[in-house]
């Protein structure tokens, strides 16, 4: 998970070392009394010792606060668990203070998270879920910026250059309602989180969203050109044409922004599929039968869908190239992640364990049966022939 775990205990060094060894945490346990004068600025040696330590023994409450403070100054995001009153200052200081089950009221008040169940395994689940949430937020940010650029630039340029309003006020409202209704489902989407902590990369977010937004503007003007200069549609029909195009293309953009790789690399959640298909069926019916706009007909609606899908496939390729440019240090986008075989390994290990246990049980039964046969053939004691 990319999280370095350190043990902080008030126990003696020998107990702390043995406990850390049994837990597989390492044996580099530092005596808290050797950390130096905590009332003054920490020394470079003390900071390095704290960063490299696997744990700390003979710790007093002020040591806990000091350890958290030093790690934060070194640029680390620090989380801490505790249950007592003396843990409250360090819990408050930490980036994420976690009060365990049965903690005192002071610890609960100082902590960011309060565990209600016994054990610490729930912390791992919380880390995984928070990373899923981060990926969804990242996808939403890219989508929202790209869509804003797409609509605003297209509207502004169409008005300034062609003196034409491509969408009416009612169309804009309907577009916003349907888009917002579908994008809510991204909170339940399937995502792949990384094995290490992440932070916002605004250069990447703005870069990818700008690329997708600009290409969307080009695609919109391409359809506008076809409608006016090639097919010679009137302005009312062009408005309906552009409304349906912006609606369909906007929802397809969701499937572009939710993955770093090709759009098919991560299966969308069922609720996302239902939301997108439902809103776009409604948008298509509105455009075909002309609710608050000029009816477009099924033929032109099919043409818009085909046009939007063609640009969607092109945008997916351009997105991959944009990720390579804005984030070249990452793993190649088309490279597959190593398959996690842990569940299969665990299941097979249990099968082998059962086979071994059953085998031992059979051997015991064979031994007992053989012992009974041998003893049965032996004459009783005191009756030697």
Image (cartoon, helix red, strand yellow):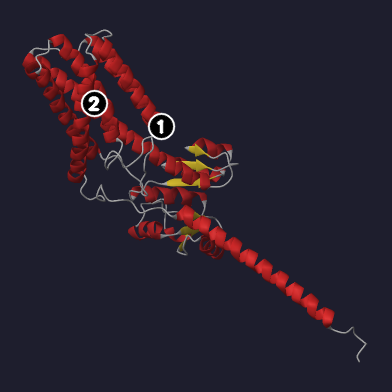
Q: Is residue 187 above or below residue 94?
A: above
Q: Position of residue 237 (x, y in %)?
A: 17, 11
- The residue carrying pointer 1 sits among few (fewer than 14), some (14 to 19) or many (20 or more) residues within 10 Å by Cα, namely few
Q: Which residue is mark 2?
A: 249
Q: Residue furthest right?
A: 383
**Image quarter for residue 42?**
bottom left
Left or right, 119 with reference to 222: right
Instruction: Say what secondary structure mark 2 lies in.
Output: helix
Confirm whether residue 32 shows in the render.
no
Which of the two residues, 364 or 321, is positioned nearer the viewer here? 364
Q: Residue furthest front?
A: 299
In this rendered view, identify the residue nearer to me: 97 or 381.
381
- For marks 2 and 1, the one nearer the N-term is 2
Image spot of residue 30 (x, y percent): 46, 61
Q: Secondary structure at mark 1?
A: helix
Residue 166: % across, % down: 16, 14
Q: Residue at x 52, y 47 (%)?
A: 121
Inter-mark Cα distance, 2 to 1? 20 Å
Question: Looking at the rendering, in which quadrant would you find the C terminus?
Answer: bottom right
Tell me residue 55's x, y (percent): 47, 58
Question: Along the horizontal axis of the image, is 187 left or right of 248?
Answer: right
Please name whichever residue, 243 or 300, is drawn nearer the observer in this view of the structure: 300
Q: Which residue is mark 1?
A: 270
């Amino acid at each position: 998970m990319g999280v370095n775990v350190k043990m902080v205990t008030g126990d003696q060094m020998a107990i702390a070392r043995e406990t850390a060894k049994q837990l597989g945490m390492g044996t580099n346990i530092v005596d808290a009394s050797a950390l130096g004068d905590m009332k003054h600025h920490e020394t470079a040696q003390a900071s390095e010792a704290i960063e490299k330590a696997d744990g700390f023994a003979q710790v007093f409450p002020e040591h806990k606060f000091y350890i958290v403070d030093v790690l934060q100054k070194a640029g680390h995001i620090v989380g801490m668990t505790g249950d007592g009153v003396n843990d409250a200052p360090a819990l408050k200081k930490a980036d994420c203070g976690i009060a365990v089950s049965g903690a005192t009221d002071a610890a609960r008040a100082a902590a960011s998270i309060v565990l209600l169940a016994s054990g610490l395994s729930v912390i791992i689940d919380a880390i995984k879920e928070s990373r899923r949430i981060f990926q969804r937020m990242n996808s939403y940010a890219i989508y929202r910026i790209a869509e804003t650029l797409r609509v605003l630039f297209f509207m502004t340029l169409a008005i300034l250059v062609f003196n034409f309003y491509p969408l009416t006020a009612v169309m804009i409202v309907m577009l916003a309602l349907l888009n917002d209704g579908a994008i809510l489902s991204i909170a339940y989407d399937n995502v792949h989180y990384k094995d290490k902590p992440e932070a916002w990369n605004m250069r990447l977010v703005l870069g990818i969203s700008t690329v997708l937004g600009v290409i969307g503007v080009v695609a919109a003007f391409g359809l506008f050109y076809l409608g006016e200069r090639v097919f010679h549609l009137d302005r009312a029909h062009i408005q309906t044409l552009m409304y349906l195009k912006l609606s369909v293309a906007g929802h397809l953009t969701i499937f572009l922004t939710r993955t770093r790789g090709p759009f098919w690399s991560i299966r969308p959640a069922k609720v996302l599929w239902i939301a997108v298909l439902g809103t776009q069926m409604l948008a298509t019916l509105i455009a075909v039968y002309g609710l608050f706009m000029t009816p477009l007909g099924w033929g032109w609606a099919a043409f818009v869908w085909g046009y939007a899908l063609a640009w969607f496939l092109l945008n997916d390729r351009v997105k991959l190239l944009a990720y390579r440019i804005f984030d070249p240090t990452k793993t190649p986008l088309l490279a597959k992640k190593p398959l996690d075989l842990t569940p299969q390994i665990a299941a097979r290990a249990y099968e082998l364990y059962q086979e071994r246990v059953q085998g031992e049980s059979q051997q015991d039964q064979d031994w007992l049966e053989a012992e009974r046969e041998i003893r049965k053939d032996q004459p009783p004691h005191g009756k030697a022939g």
